[in-house]
Image (cartoon, rainbow, N blue to C red):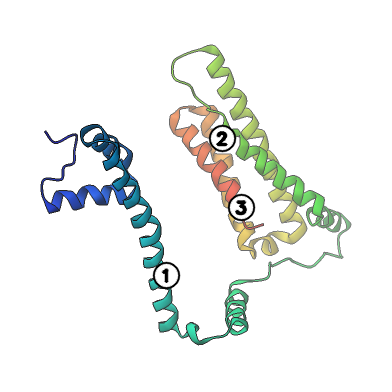
């Protein structure tokens, strides 16, 4: 009798079973069945096939693809220093300087806020708040079943996320004052921060008005997007 969902009755089914082994999906089950039906010695074949097929075969395949790609692109004929220079030119095309408006000199208050938002400790503090906000996802916000402790835990997590979102709103206002709204809008990173902050404010309103699974999902999305704003840094 053919065990489970595979068999070696013909070439097609045999190749399909071996392809499953090569993809590392369910290969342990196939090995255990072969050992149970045929004996321990036959299980060595599966291990050898995984080793040769997945490791050596895949490595050779990728190596041939990369070698052909380099030959077609002409990089195979370059020396080590020439390849480094080529990679450096590609990196220079990608790198773009951040748009930072100059320090205002007409207003003391604006200059004071500018010095605050540009200070390294302020940037690290805001990054730490983003990390704290992201760590809230380590705890399950909503548990199955109705219990007072579960609702209290969800309320505490929502309140903590709301408080951190308010801090991000304050950051947006401070940067808008320091850079002026036009200068703030010139930076793509500031635009992304503004979009995520607006979504966070919308989530706060919906969470305290509706408070259902959809609002929690929106809160998760906002936290993840907020984390992406500091990945570039």
Marks 1/3: CA distance? 36 Å
- Residue tagged by mark 3? 229
Quadrant that contains the N terminus? top left
- Residue tagged by mark 2? 137
Marks 1/2: CA distance? 40 Å
Q: Which mark is residue 133?
A: none
At x 44%, y 29%, the residue is 213
At x 15%, y 48%, the residue is 13
In this view, the mark in front (1 or 3): 1
At x 68%, y 70%, the residue is 97
In this view, the mark in front (2 or 3): 2
SS at badge 2: helix
Q: Nearer the viewer, residue 232 or 221?
A: 232
Q: Where is 57 relative to 149, above or below?
A: below
Which of the two discs, 2 and 3, labels the residue nearer the N terminus?
Answer: 2
Marks 2/3: CA distance? 16 Å
- Residue tagged by mark 1? 63
x, y percentage for residue 38?
Answer: 21, 36
SS at badge 1: helix
């Amino acid at each position: 009798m053919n065990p489970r969902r595979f068999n070696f009755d013909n070439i097609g089914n045999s190749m399909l079973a071996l392809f499953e082994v090569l993809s590392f999906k369910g290969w342990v089950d196939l090995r255990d069945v072969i050992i149970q039906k045929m004996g321990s010695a036959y299980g060595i074949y599966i291990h050898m096939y995984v080793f040769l097929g997945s490791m050596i075969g895949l490595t050779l395949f990728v190596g041939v693809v990369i070698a052909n790609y380099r030959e077609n692109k002409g990089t195979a004929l370059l020396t080590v220093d020439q390849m480094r220079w080529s990679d450096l030119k590609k990196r220079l095309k990608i790198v773009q300087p951040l748009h930072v408006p100059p320090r205002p000199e007409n207003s003391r208050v604006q200059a004071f806020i500018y010095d605050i938002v540009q200070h390294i400790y302020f940037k690290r503090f805001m990054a730490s708040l983003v990390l704290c906000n992201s760590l809230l996802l380590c705890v399950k916000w909503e548990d199955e079943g109705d219990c007072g402790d579960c609702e209290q835990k969800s309320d505490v997590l929502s309140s903590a996320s709301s408080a951190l979102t308010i801090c991000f709103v304050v950051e947006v206002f401070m940067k808008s004052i320091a850079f002026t709204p036009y200068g703030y809008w010139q930076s793509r990173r500031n635009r992304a921060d503004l979009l995520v902050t607006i979504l966070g404010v919308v989530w706060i309103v919906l969470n305290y008005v509706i408070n259902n699974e959809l609002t929690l999902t929106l809160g998760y999305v906002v936290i993840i997007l907020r984390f992406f704003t500091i990945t570039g840094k």
